[in-house]
Image (cartoon, rainbow, N blue to C red):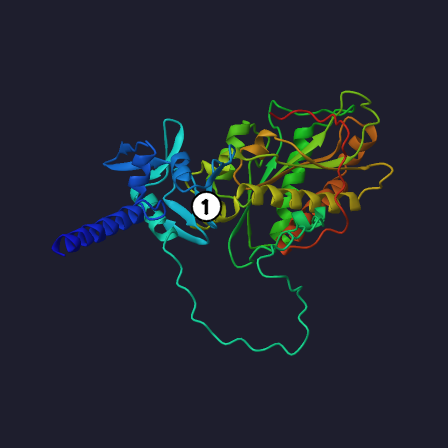
Amino acid sequence: MRIRFHLLKIALVGLFLFGFIARAANPEELSLEQKALSANITFKNMLGEKWITLPDFAFLLKGSLKEDPVSRRSEITFKNHRLVFLPESKKALYDDQITEMKQPARLVSGVMAIPFSFASLVTNLAFIPAPKPAPVFQPVPTEKPTTEIRPAGETPLPQMASINMPTVAEIIAAPAIDQNREFVLVIDAGHGDHDSGAVGPWGLKEKDVNLDLARGLADYLKKNRPKIKVALTRGDDTFLRLEERTHLANSLNADMFVSIHTNSAKLNRYTASGVETFYPRSKPTLYASASASEDEIASLLKQGGNQDVLQRSQYLAALIQEYLIDIFISDIVPDRGIKKKDFYVLKYTNMVSVLIEVGFICNPNIEANLKSPAVRRAISAAIGRGIEAYLDGQPLKSSISVDPGAIEERSYE
């Protein structure tokens, strides 16, 4: 009898130990460090603490890592959770909440890494089981249910996603800008001094037209939108390198950058005509800005930021283009549409930006019109009305006009 009791006791102890071991082996309940050790993942030691790379972290979470090569924004998705990091920023996004790490995310041997303490904290939070809701009595339906009743255990067919894509106008529409906050606009008159830009058949220089249009735009906005802080990259016949123009706008933390040019063509010089507006293809420097505000960082984390700025630039370009073509006779100055182009001043400014080609100065008829102060004032006012429409969040009057063909613009790289 005593022997049988000892055997039973040993069996119970064995079952308890087996249950404990099995419970400890549950991957959901292992600590992040235990998971890393079992997966032969090593930590990086830096600045007095341990770091884990985002690819390793995503692997341990059984999630996926998506990195934007332009913005360098990294996003990990796992178990219906989302983590977003920016290089050299302590801010991180966990689901919809912005939190802060002890150290900013850093590149370690070319790979983004975060403090292990933060990674461990996120893991503990993410795998806490949600409490089960208390049972409640459900009212008995008195009408025939609208949903289809299926037999128990039958898997419903997947629903097809809507194939109605947003229209172009919906994609680039943007909300109005808060009129109570300071808004900084930098107007860039292309070329200057020894760099005359394009020269018309009768000697009109692009640099002079650009400067007069920029001054006219500044005057229009000061009169109609006095709360806007307007700055000119150049107020006289001076020359600034492209780097100086972009540095000025970035140093002012400007909200908008508008560069004004007149066009020229290599072929059909005397008949080329039309007005067009460019917006940036990319803005790699937007994320490298060390002076980014809390709101900008939040926007980058939540929305990607870069895409928002690019879409707003497209929206601004479309509005300006609409107001410009309104003042021209379409048979003489056709609508050449808006186009995506990585001109230096568009690519390396951190804010919403456009570059406008107001006409082909190589065309004698266009050159004669651009000599007229009245025509220049009309052009400046049209650009100003486009900016006002942007600030007010006005919808486009029609679908965007985009010329898919080859264009003969000069390079400002």
Please give left or right for residue 121 compared with residue 360 in the image: left
Residue 182 lies, in percent from the top left, at: 51, 53
Label 1: few (<14), some or many (≥20) within 10 Å? some
Residue 114 lies, in percent from the top left, at: 35, 39
Give 281 or 202, whichever is nearer the viewer: 281
Residue 43 lies, in percent from the top left, at: 30, 33
Residue found 62% across the figure and 50% down from its top: 221
Query: Would you identify the image quadrant in which residue 117 lies?
Result: top left
- Examine the rendering and report whether any part of residue 257 can be seen: no
What residue is disc 1 on? 78
Please give left or right for residue 301 compared with residue 188 in the image: left
In the displayed orientation, state which residue is furthest to the left: 2
Give 133 or 202, whichever is nearer the viewer: 133
SS under mark 1:
strand
Query: Would you identify the image quadrant in which residue 411 lies?
Result: top right
Give 167 or 16, whichever is nearer the viewer: 16
Q: Quadrant of the C terminus?
A: top right
Query: Would you identify the image quadrant in which residue 60 lies?
Result: top left
In the displayed orientation, state which residue is furthest to the front: 1
Q: Quadrant of the N terminus?
A: bottom left
Residue 125, compared with residue 343, is above or below; it is below
Residue found 62% across the figure and 31% down from its top: 190
Q: Residue type at mark 1?
A: Phe
Residue found 51% across the figure and 30% down from its top: 244
Please give left or right for residue 326 compared with residue 348 in the image: right
Give 317 or 70, whichever is nearer the viewer: 70
Residue found 72% across the figure and 29% down from its top: 263
Residue 287 lies, in percent from the top left, at: 47, 38
Residue 127, compared with residue 270, is above or below; it is below
Number of numbered callouts drawn: 1
